[in-house]
């Protein structure tokens, strides 16, 4: 028997095994959080024949609702969450609903959830809803009574502060290591704050087994990087984007957010460990192994947007287990996994000081020497839009009125933050191909504006409402009077209109919950809490507040800069170079008018496969689902989804057939909302 025949037979057997075995997508982000599958039934040669295999629609979308769930597929069942945060279990081969659980207990109303799915472990499904962590029976979807109190744990408890004063939830599923469910959290970034501590819960009982204080307490490492009593008041520093488990090394990796208050740090002088950090912890005990702080004393809301990726790279012919971390401002950091040693040099640059009363910023901030940034980082006049002469003139006038520049601090005149709070990299995270050491990142290039205003309700009203409704609230020909509005509308209805807009009034979805509530209070009562002489005695009171982050747009609602407005990037982690970059997304109406391939807002991450493909939805306005050649960035296939696929897809094999599935929730930045899940496969 020839060697050729033996090798050919082995290869054929491997291919047959690949096409017949079942393969799960067992966890959010996939194994090692690299969004990779070795499945190759769908490949470069046949991807153009993909077709819809099944569609499921929960029919609970509403204006502004979203679906960000990365479906988990285990044992032939797909688990995900809907716009109203109902948990569903579907037959992964047909999309047939097996069970549905409503953690809201039938509550109605347009609560806007940003939720990325569930954790499946043995006989149970873990999911969060508002401040509660639920454990559900995987077969029936009913709560497991022995977990916590009747199936749920209150995430506000065990944080050394009165639970009723805290706001704690979790938008990203936790990870399981041995018998521990390890989780970050979502908390408001206002004052007084809720701490973003990382916790491990017993998967059987729900009891807390360990906790890592991301805002250190007296005697703990990092306590001296905050004011003496900051841990009693400050919040944030939370791993809202989730955590990543390295089971082989018994380590858990997290990337934390900014500290509260986001944009004015006078109450938290110092570097503020462990905000804006890549953290490596002992998975069994929560003990810190190493950390790296990406932003010192963050006032730009440039928190790490995604959990770390566990990758393997080559240095001088040697394979090294590493951690890759993307950022909102276009950097990729790379560290040796066990020690935290940087695998590319990290330098420090001097950054401008703040002119705002009492603010004290760090003098220098870090940056990796390699790879080069995957997003533009400094907005100049030459980069402003030329889409029309009128758009250019309007944008230029606004640009010249405001502070700008990379690391320009928030100001009373308004500061352009670029890249903005929603990109470069975002919560969809990066995908990594272990075959090529390429890291794939989709990026937003959207400037945002932050402006500090005096911390009183009149100032907030004047900055957002008075142009149309007048400072005396008596209205104008363009807008109705608001005097006595509390007798005509409920507080909830007022908050909804402020958030979503109505008629000619634009929405303010980025104003923030606390600002919206304060504005409603002023409209209903006329009282200005900021001018109450007792308010300055409150340790949580600050002299200035943000008037709400807002997208910088041209007068027609498009980005104010030259394209590309969104990109898809392949970064070589061995060489520290960008292998390829392509515009990503477009606005259908601009494409029809002869301006295609501009790039656009995009939310949700990619999946890379052994079939040579990169699958990604994400593009916000064209609603496309795409397949690219992972080596070249060439678009091989695309289709239009029911709503934008602002989520990370999953891929799995069932009964010898490979599927690619994505949730289609839309709802970002004014795009239409949806509630469908669509699975694709090759024709049978």
Image: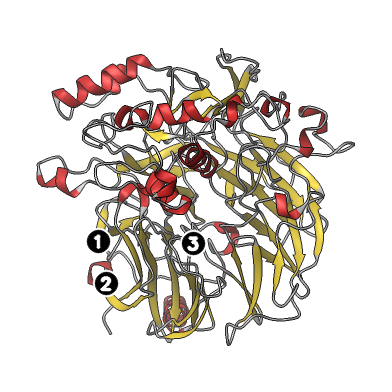
Task: Name the residue at 84% across, 39% down.
Answer: 217
Instruction: Give the number of the disc on residue 637.
Output: 1
In which image quadrant can residue 563 be found?
top left
Q: Kindly report the distance in space between the C-alpha atoms of the residues bearing marks 3 and 1.
A: 19 Å
| Dot 2 crowding, Cα within 10 Å, few <14, some 14–19, many 20+ | some
Are the two marked residues, 2 and 1, in contact with CB atoms closer than 8 angstroms? yes
User: Please, what secondary structure does the residue beneath circle 2 have?
Assistant: loop
* Along the line of sight, the residue nearer the viewer: 434 or 76: 76
Q: Kindly identify which residue carries mark 2.
A: 50
Q: In which quarter of the image is the C terminus?
A: bottom left
Q: How crowded is mark 1: few (under 14 residues within 10 Å), some or many (20 or more)?
A: some
Numbered badge on residue 36: 3
SS type, badge 3: strand
Q: Residue 606 carries which label?
A: none
- The residue that appears at 36% across and 51% down in the rendered structure is 668
Q: In which quarter of the image is residue 649?
A: bottom left
Q: Nearer the viewer, residue 273 or 656?
A: 273
Q: Is any part of residue 369 visible from this angle?
A: no
Q: Distance between the residues labelled 3 and 2?
A: 19 Å
Task: Please report whichever mark, 3 or 2, sits nearer to the chain's N-terminal start.
Answer: 3
Q: In the image, 519: left or right of 156?
A: left
The residue shown at (56%, 26%) is: 455
Q: Report x, y in % for residue 174.
A: 64, 62
Give above or below for 634 relative to 304.
below
* Side of 629 where 435 appears, left or right: right
Q: In this view, does 302 lie to the left or right of 374?
A: right
Q: Is mark 1 on a helix, strand or loop?
A: strand
């Amino acid at each position: 028997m020839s060697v050729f025949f033996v090798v050919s037979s082995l290869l054929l057997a491997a291919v047959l095994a690949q096409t017949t075995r079942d393969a799960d997508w067992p966890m959010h982000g996939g194994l090692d959080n690299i969004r990779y599958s070795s499945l190759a039934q769908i490949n470069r040669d046949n991807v153009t024949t993909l077709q819809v295999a099944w569609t499921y629609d929960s029919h609970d979308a509403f204006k502004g609702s979203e679906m960000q769930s990365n479906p988990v597929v285990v044992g032939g069942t797909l688990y995900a969450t809907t716009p109203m945060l109902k948990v569903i279990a579907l037959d992964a081969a047909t999309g047939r609903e097996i069970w549905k659980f409503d953690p809201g207990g039938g509550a109605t109303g347009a609560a806007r959830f940003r939720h990325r799915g569930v954790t499946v472990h043995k006989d149970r499904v873990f999911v969060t809803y508002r401040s509660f962590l639920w454990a559900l029976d995987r077969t029936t979807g009913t709560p497991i009574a022995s977990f916590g109190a009747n199936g749920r744990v209150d995430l506000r408890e065990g944080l050394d502060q009165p639970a009723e004063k805290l706001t704690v939830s979790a938008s990203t599923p936790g990870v399981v290591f041995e018998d521990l469910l390890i989780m970050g959290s979502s908390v408001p970034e206002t004052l007084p704050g809720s701490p973003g501590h990382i916790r491990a819960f017993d998967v059987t009982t729900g009891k807390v087994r360990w906790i890592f204080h991301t805002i250190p307490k007296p005697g703990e490492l990092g306590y001296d990087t905050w004011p003496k009593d900051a841990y009693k008041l400050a919040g944030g520093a939370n791993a809202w984007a989730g955590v990543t488990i390295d089971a082989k090394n018994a380590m858990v990796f997290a990337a934390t957010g900014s500290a509260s208050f986001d944009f004015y740090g006078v109450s938290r002088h110092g570097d503020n460990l462990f905000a804006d950090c890549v953290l490596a912890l002992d998975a069994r005990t929560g003990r810190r192994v190493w950390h790296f702080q990406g932003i010192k004393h963050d006032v730009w809301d440039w928190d790490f947007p995604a959990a770390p990726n566990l990758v393997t790279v080559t240095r001088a012919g040697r394979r090294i287990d590493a951690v890759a971390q993307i950022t909102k401002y276009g950097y990729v950091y790379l560290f040796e996994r066990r020690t935290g040693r940087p695998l590319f040099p990290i330098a420090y640059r001097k950054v401008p000081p703040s002119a705002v009363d009492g603010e004290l910023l760090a003098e220098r901030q870090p940056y990796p020497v390699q790879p080069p940034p995957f997003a533009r980082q400094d907005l100049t006049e030459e980069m402003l839009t030329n889409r029309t002469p009128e758009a250019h003139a309007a944008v230029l006038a606004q640009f010249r009125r405001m502070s700008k520049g990379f690391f320009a601090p928030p100001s009373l005149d308004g500061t352009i933050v670029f890249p903005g709070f929603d990109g470069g990299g975002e919560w969809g995270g990066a995908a990594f191909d272990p075959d090529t050491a390429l890291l794939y990142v989709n990026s937003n290039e959207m400037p945002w504006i932050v402006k500090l205003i005096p911390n009183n309700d009149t100032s907030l009203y004047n900055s957002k409402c008075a142009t149309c409704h007048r400072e005396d609230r008596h209205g104008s020909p363009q807008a109705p009077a608001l005097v006595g509005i509390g007798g005509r509308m409920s507080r909830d209805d007022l908050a909804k209109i402020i958030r979503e807009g109505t008629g000619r009034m634009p929405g303010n979805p980025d104003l923030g919950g606390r600002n919206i509530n304060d504005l409603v209070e002023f409209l209903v009562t006329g009282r200005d809490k900021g001018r109450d002489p007792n308010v300055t005695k409150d340790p949580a009171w600050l002299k200035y507040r943000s008037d709400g982050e807002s997208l910088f747009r041209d007068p027609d609602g498009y980005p104010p800069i030259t394209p590309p407005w969104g990109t898809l990037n392949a970064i070589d982690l061995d060489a520290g170079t960008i292998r390829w970059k392509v515009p990503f997304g477009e606005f259908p109406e601009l494409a029809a008018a002869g301006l295609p391939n501009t790039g656009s807002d995009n939310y949700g991450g990619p999946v890379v496969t052994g079939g040579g493909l990169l699958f990604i939805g994400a593009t916000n306005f064209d609603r496309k689902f795409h397949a690219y050649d992972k080596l070249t960035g060439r678009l091989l296939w695309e289709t239009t989804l029911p709503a934008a696929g602002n989520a990370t897809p999953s891929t799995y094999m069932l009964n010898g057939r490979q599927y690619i599935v994505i949730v289609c929730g839309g709802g970002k930045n004014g795009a239409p909302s949806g509630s469908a899940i669509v699975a694709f496969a090759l024709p049978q």
